[in-house]
Image (spheres, rainbow, N blue to C red):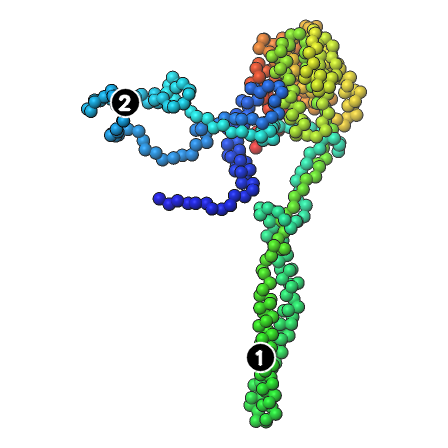
Amino acid sequence: MAHFIDRRLNSKGKSTINRQRFIKRYKQQIKRAVSDAVGKRSVTNVESGEQISIPTRDISEPVFHTGKGGRRDMVHPGNDQFSEGDRIERPPQGASRGNGDGDASNDGEGQDEFVFSISKDEYLSILFEDLELPNLKKNQFNHVTQYETYRAGYQTDGIPSNLDIVRSLKGSVARRIALTATDKRKLRELEERYERLKANEGNNTDSTDESMRANSQLVTEEQIALEADIAALKAKIAKVPFIDTFDLRFKNYDKRPLPSSKAVMFCLMDVSGSMDQATKETAKRFYILLYLFLSRTYENVDVVYIRHHTQAKEVDEQEFFYSQETGGTIVSSALKLMKDIIEERYSDGLWNIYGAQASDGDNWADDSPKCSALLAHHLLPVCRYYTYIEITERPHQSLWKGFEQVSASHDNFMCKHIESQADIYPVFREIFKRADADAS
């Protein structure tokens, strides 16, 4: 059996690289675990990290092992129940009990789980992957800032993956030319002079004149000196390295803002007496998820919070999520207030307007037609997208039925139903799913 020992030093980012490789490899299992974890969180810790469990069978590597069966001779120390030759019945498959604290399952099967902790950034990245504001139009170079990565020249330091080989070799050639040009020119001159002396030496050797022979001896000494100079120059030129760290050039990347649009999100929440505490908390979970999505994916998106019972009121973030005010139910009051705010602040045609409304569906019967009319004739014509979330386990009432008719004739309006906290995240992803997510 061969043993391989890796003695390479760990790089500083090795654990980070391995972590990202693990997340990429088991992305689907982690996304399912994150989706299940959303409904189990409280309102106050939606944006923190998470410990998720992945079944061991999903991450185990294939192995070869000895199959069960066959004849085996075993010695059990401390036997006080059986004698030699007794036949012991084979236990049913999976009925043996391990040393764990849990109880065995009825069918004798079970699985261990691998617990993996992900950070806040990793959790939110997986949570909002492939989501976007629908129908966002780039009609104004202001407010909503998105970035694109672009090539920004070269730099002398960087990671190996960004090394530009061609640029580095060009730098190497330029450096070697600059350092050796003078020496190579002098070398050519010496070699030409050496060749001339060598030619003259042959002519002087055939001569019988004593003076010519003396000159020949001087030429020979000069040749020896030239050979030494030529060898020294060649050695000097050879010492110039083919490539040096000074020659390395790495691709440099930077981010620049893209022209984008101004956008505003209206959050309308029913706080009437029919909304019990569990229903309100479900609505808050949805809006906190929406707030995290907007704040993480886009910059400088205006968010307008509206609470309503019989009367609607624009509030700040703190009051929207934590106020205890309640009362009867007139849904049209919130829609009218949204219409007034749009006309007052966002009527210049430069804004992408979105709306998200959450309610239990309870409303005065005479008020539901007013709500449908406000949506169809005043809000949807100016909204990029509007969604209505009904949180109830009861049959749908007149408000849902009226909104369904409006949804059938408007592509930018969607009605969704949430029965429990487990439905929040799947509904949220369906509402804000990126248009090209299915294609990819």
Residue, far left: 85
The foreground one among 116 and 286 is 116
Residue type for callout 2: Arg
> In the displayed structure, would residue 404 be above or below residue 236?
above
Could you tell me which residue is drawn at 60 percent across and 89 percent down?
Answer: 214
Could you tell me which residue is drawn at 79 percent across and 25 percent down?
Answer: 348
> In the displayed structure, would residue 57 be above or below residue 377?
below
Q: Quadrant of the N terminus?
A: top left
Could you tell me which residue is drawn at 34 percent across and 20 percent down?
Answer: 95
Query: Residue 347 at what x, y percent from top left?
Result: 78, 23
Query: Residue 406 at what x, y percent from top left?
Result: 67, 15
Q: CA distance from mark 1 to mark 2?
A: 98 Å
Q: Quadrant of the C terminus?
A: top right
- The residue carrying mark 1 is 224
Name the element at disc 1: helix
Name the element at disc 2: loop
**Count of numbered labels shown in the rendering:** 2
The image quarter containing residue 104 is: top left
Which badge, 1 or 2, comes first in the chain's sequence?
Answer: 2
Residue type for callout 1: Ile
Say the numbered circle drawn on residue 90: 2
Q: Is residue 314 visible?
A: yes
